[in-house]
Image (cartoon, grey):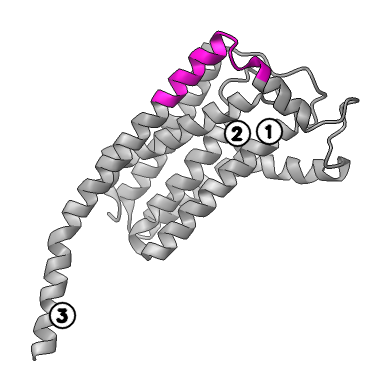
Amino acid sequence: MVGYLHRGCACSTLGYHLPMLQTNLERVALIAGLACFAGFLVLDRLVARGDTQTFDQRLIRALRFPFGAPRMGMAWVPVMRGITQLGGPVLRYSIALPAALLLYRAGFPKTAIWFVTALGSGWIVDGLLKHLFRRQRPTIVPHLAPAGGPSFPSGHTLNAALVYAALAMAWAPILSLAGIGAALTAAVFISFAVAFSRVWLGVHWPTDVTAGWLVGTGWWMTAFALGGRMMGN
């Protein structure tokens, strides 16, 4: 009987602290998200003034031989093209849209709405930023993958940072703490891999992918801060 009461008290205490924990997480996410946006704005000013040009050029050239071939070897080209597609539109939609439908059918309609809203608004912002800044893609090395449109920020990196982390957070209510940590770690790893592949393939400047990661990460964090209460519903 005593053990039952003890477990009951523990559950009551946990239930009492959950709203506070949720609020604290939302506050941290909002601060972190705003910090990412601030970092993006600082980076934009540096790029606009040309302060990052030497860094960008040196890093891209460091990945190539003087005649333009990748130092890691041409055998890595299809591998990097495959990695870069993890942030591309086809694979992005094939993951995001079924995930939203699965969330809805699993009994989490509000979570599905949050997920679709976070991703849809992020994709709109991606397009707006590209056409606002209209930075030219690098031409100092041959492109090893098709690429078009403005360069800043990297859309592949932005979407990789947004989609996979938002997906991890959408399923967080049914995951353990270890599961949430593993899912977010995997999401960050994928976004870094996509970012590296864009520079390695020669289709983006290093500051492009940095900017894309900052916006994508800041966007899902801010979305969680503003709509985290929808999770699990």
- Say if residue 175 shows up in the picture: no
Tag 2 and tag 1, C-beta contact below 8 Å: yes
Measure the alpha-carbon separation of dots 2 and 3.
48 Å
The image quadrant of residue 146 is top right
Q: Is residue 207 above or below residue 232?
A: above
Dot 2: what SS?
A: helix
Q: CA distance from mark 2 to mark 1?
A: 8 Å
The image shows residue 17 at horizontal and vertical percentages of 16, 59
Q: Is residue 164 left or right of residue 169?
A: right
The amino acid on which the numbered mark 2 sits, given as a three-letter code, is His
Q: For the view shown, which residue lies furthest in the bottom direction?
A: 1
Q: Which residue is mark 1?
A: 198
Would you name the residue on which mark 2 appears? Answer: 156
Find numbered disc 3 in the image and state the secondary structure of the residue it sits on: helix
Mark seen at residue 137: none
Residue at which label 3 appears: 7
Q: Is residue 167 visible?
A: yes
User: Sequence order check: which comes first, mark 3 or mark 1?
Assistant: 3
